[in-house]
Image (tube, rainbow, N blue to C red):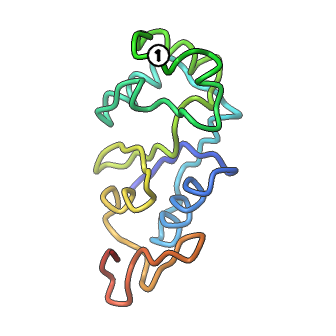
Amino acid sequence: MTVVIHHNPDCGTSRNVLAIIEAAGYRPVVIEYLKTGWTLPQLQALFAAADLSPRDALRTTKSPAAELRLLDPEVRDDDILQAMLAHPVLVNRPIVCSPKGVRLCRPSARVLDLLDTWPKGPFYIEGGELLIDADGRRAG
């Protein structure tokens, strides 16, 4: 099964999701979108597959969203998309694609729904949170 992660290595959640995918035995395609940028068709396809609007996918913290005045509810989706093309950091992450679907994987545990196999438990993510218990079940 091919798994693709749109990844920011500086983001703890993105690192956690990548670690979960790899610990489950997958060799994902890793797209560092801050380096590659986005295309309009790419964003439209990802958002449609994940059932997200551009506003749903907008990173509102640790991004220029406020200074670009994108937080105003009157801002159109097309304007948000154009801003995302100019400022890739505005897209929340990580977005993961697999044959089971496409998701914005925040929190990290959301990636488990996209995987056929999970890491062996117990499995902890950064910060020490238990994600999968010793019996192989989702913790929490």
Above or below, 53 relative to 74: below
Which quadrant of the figure has residue 114? Answer: bottom left
Q: Quarter of the image containing the N terminus?
A: bottom left
Say whether residue 1 is left or right of residue 8: left
Instruction: Identify the residue shown where x is 51% and y is 38%.
Output: 92
Badge 1 amino acid = Asp
Instruction: Identify the residue shown where x is 51% and y is 59%.
Output: 17
Q: Position of residue 107 (x, y in %)?
A: 43, 55
Q: Position of residue 52 (x, y in %)?
A: 34, 31
Can you identify the residue that label 1 sits on? 72
Q: Position of residue 87 (x, y in %)?
A: 65, 22
Say whether residue 140 is left or right of residue 54: left
**SS of the residue under disc 1:** loop
Which quadrant of the figure has residue 84? Answer: top right
Above or below, 87 relative to 115: above
Q: Residue most toward the bottom?
A: 134
Q: Which is more toward the observer, 71 or 78? A: 71
Above or below, 61 relative to 44: below
Instruction: Identify the residue shown where x is 40% and y is 21%.
Output: 44
Q: Which is more toward the observer, 11 or 18? A: 11
Q: Position of residue 25 (x, y in %)?
A: 47, 70
Above or below, 54 relative to 109: above
